[in-house]
Structures are given as structure tokens and as C-alpha cells.
């Protein structure tokens, strides 16, 4: 008998609110997370994390993450977007599951075809309560490169969660991934961020949307999956994977975030899952984070700050500058090619 919860579902149930509610994924996550915190499984507790909204029109959220900067596991050195998985280095098959495994996720439509487990584990260096890692097919030892299965699973988790605050984030290698074993960050952020609300511009005969530079400084591509369109989940996953695989083949670093948010028109709605993909400048080797970095969360406007003085003094203009430096030139160079990639079908 398994010593951990198993959240079992099938694809057709994802659009059924009653069934999704009954699975109580968020309760499983929080109950197990709190238990592991009480048992001392984390490197630190989250009581000292502070946050404030930075003054300005974009409403960036600064978070003081002093313990994470000091106590987290040193990031592995990443020299290539396609760096191979190394079983001898730290990976998620080396964890003590009795102290870190939150639950297994089982889509019964895939159960007979899939031997390896899809699991949620705690992030032992958390940014907030509930911060976990989603690890697809953990025993397969997959490198930190997105696959159709990984994106499909992440979208399923977004759908299984009933919290409006759920987010999933992926950092590619050379884009601040710290472990080369395929994983997403699952976390809960109640502060509404601009990327959830700003209007989107449709691409020319393409399935994705973009932000205009006037609306948001970090330029990227956006997919929408409406609550009433769960039948399109697999299609969206394949389209996003087409882009991330293309970026990987070109050795272009990238970050991906899933969040609830508004539709094309923007506003305060949360009836869509927004899948945000940013191509960005590469960060090669093992880097000291300094005051803050520009990884997936920071591109959404949630800035993890690692020094007290910077937390107290950070202003909107410097975040805008960092977001632009990470994304604008890469987006301008690649966007015409991405249009061709999707118009060629």
C-alpha cells in the first residue's frame, strides 16, 4: 500500500467542477506541506518572508527572500539548454519521499501506457506556503527540457486546482533552472499581477497572442485555455511544446508560466488559463543571484529579492529595465520566425 496520497482522475473529468472539487488537490497539497513543515523537512520556514507592492502602474510584487538566498541548495552549473541529465548529480530520485513526497498524480487515461510516476514534492527552499515541485515521470530521469507530456500534466494540475491563486512556472536550463531534472514550480500567489489582466494582441493567423510593448515590458507569447474549452487542453499543450522544442533546438533560453487570468480583452476575469512563454537572454554557468534575477516569476512581476536594502528600495523602473534586457531583443529577433513556424501548418 502506498504511503502517500494518489490523486486520480481522467481527462473527461477535468471540465466537471463537481468532480474536480471532490478531488481536493489544494487541500492535499496544503495538508501535506504543513505536515512536512512541522516535521522539519524544509531548510527554513516561511514566517520571515515579507512582501510589498512596488509603486507604479504595473503593480510589481517584491518579496524579501533572505533565507532562500542563504540556505537553498547551490544551483548546478548549466552550460547548454540541452545539457544531458546526470544521474550522479542531485536529482529528484535522490529525495527521501517519506519527508518530501506530497502526492502522485494519475490520469487513468494514460495509466496503462506510463510506468513512471508523475509526482508533487515539496520545494525544501520555499518562496511561500504551499510551494511544491511538479516532477513528471520522475523515474525516467528527464533533463530540464519541456515535453508534450510535461506541459499537458501542468495544464491538468492548473485545472485540478480550484484556487484562483495557483501558478506553475518553468525555467529552462540557462534561464535560472537550478536542477537539471524536469520540473515545474507550483505555488500560490494571491496578489493579482499585470500579466493576468493586460489585454492581448492576436498573432497573424497563429494560435497564440502577444503583449504589446506599451502594455508590458517583458515581451513573449501567450496561449489561452478557457474554463469552458477543456477539450482544447491537449491542443494547447502541443502548440506550446512546438514553440518550446523549437526554442530548445535553437539553444534559446526560455521561461514558461501558467496562471489564471482574463481573456483576450484583459480585465479582472480569471476564467482562462494564460500560458506565458518568454524567450530570453541565456545565463550560462552557475550564477550568484545578487539582489534579484530575472527568472520565470520575475518575468510575471513577482520579484524575489535577496538583499534587505534592495527589498526596501527597489523601484518599478529597474524591474522594467531588467525585464526588457532579458527579453526584448530576443523577442524582436525570433518573433518573425515563430510566426512562420505556426503559419506553416
Image (tube, rainbow, N blue to C red):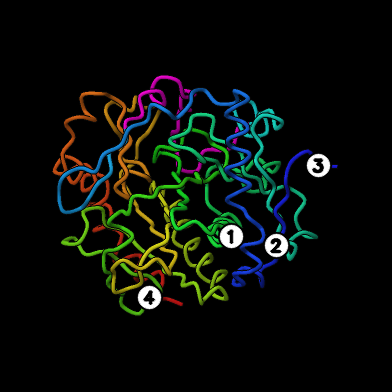
Residue 273 as seen in the image, left or right of residue 298: right
The residue drawn where x is 63% and y is 47% is: 28
Q: Is residue 47 above or below residue 341?
A: above
Q: For the residues labelled 1 and 2, say whether their Cβ atoms are less than 8 Å apart.
A: yes
* Residue identifier under label 1: 160
Q: Nearer the viewer, mark 4 or mark 3?
A: 3
User: What's the distance in space between the residues labelled 4 and 3, CA to CA?
Assistant: 45 Å
Q: Earlier in the sequence, mark 4 or mark 3?
A: 3
Q: Earlier in the sequence, mark 3 or mark 1?
A: 3
Q: Earlier in the sequence, mark 1 or mark 2?
A: 2
User: Residue 69 lies in magenta, yes or no?
Assistant: yes
Q: Is residue 225 above or below residue 155?
A: below
What numbered label is drawn on residue 2?
3
Q: Is residue 70 above or below residue 18?
A: above
Residue 177 as seen in the image, left or right of residue 20: left
Residue 15 as seen in the image, left or right of residue 106: left
Amino acid at each position: 500500500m502506498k504511503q502517500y496520497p494518489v490523486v486520480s482522475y481522467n481527462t473527461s473529468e477535468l471540465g466537471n467542477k463537481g468532480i474536480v472539487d471532490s478531488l481536493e488537490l489544494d487541500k492535499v497539497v496544503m495538508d501535506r506541506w504543513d505536515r512536512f513543515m512541522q516535521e522539519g523537512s524544509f531548510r527554513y520556514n516561511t514566517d520571515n518572508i515579507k512582501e510589498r507592492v512596488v509603486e507604479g502602474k504595473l503593480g510589481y510584487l517584491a518579496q524579501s527572500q533572505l533565507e532562500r538566498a542563504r540556505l537553498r541548495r547551490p544551483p548546478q552549473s548549466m552550460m547548454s539548454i540541452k545539457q544531458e541529465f546526470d544521474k550522479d548529480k542531485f536529482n529528484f530520485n535522490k529525495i527521501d519521499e517519506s519527508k518530501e513526497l506530497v502526492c502522485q498524480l494519475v490520469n487513468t487515461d494514460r495509466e496503462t501506457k506510463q510506468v513512471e510516476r508523475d509526482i508533487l514534492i515539496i520545494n525544501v527552499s520555499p518562496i511561500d506556503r504551499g510551494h511544491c515541485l511538479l516532477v513528471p515521470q520522475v523515474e525516467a530521469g528527464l533533463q530540464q527540457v519541456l515535453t508534450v507530456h510535461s506541459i499537458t500534466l501542468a495544464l491538468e494540475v492548473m485545472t485540478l486546482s480550484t484556487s484562483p491563486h495557483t501558478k506553475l512556472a518553468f525555467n529552462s536550463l540557462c534561464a535560472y533552472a537550478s536542477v537539471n531534472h524536469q520540473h515545474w514550480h507550483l505555488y500560490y500567489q494571491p496578489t493579482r499581477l499585470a500579466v493576468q489582466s493586460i489585454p492581448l494582441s492576436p498573432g497573424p493567423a497563429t494560435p497564440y497572442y502577444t503583449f504589446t510593448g506599451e502594455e508590458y515590458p517583458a515581451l513573449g507569447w501567450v496561449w489561452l485555455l478557457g474554463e469552458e474549452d477543456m477539450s482544447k487542453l491537449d491542443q494547447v499543450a502541443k502548440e506550446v511544446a512546438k514553440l518550446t522544442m523549437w526554442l530548445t533546438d535553437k539553444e534559446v533560453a526560455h521561461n514558461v508560466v501558467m496562471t489564471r487570468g482574463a481573456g483576450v480583452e484583459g480585465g479582472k476575469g480569471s476564467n482562462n488559463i494564460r500560458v506565458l512563454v518568454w524567450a530570453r537572454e541565456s545565463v550560462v554557468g552557475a550564477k550568484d543571484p545578487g539582489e534579484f534575477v530575472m527568472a520565470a516569476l520575475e518575468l510575471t512581476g513577482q520579484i524575489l529579492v535577496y538583499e534587505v536594502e534592495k527589498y526596501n528600495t527597489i523601484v518599478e523602473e529597474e524591474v522594467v529595465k531588467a525585464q526588457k534586457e532579458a527579453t526584448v531583443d530576443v523577442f524582436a529577433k525570433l518573433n518573425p520566425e515563430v510566426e512562420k513556424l505556426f503559419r506553416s501548418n
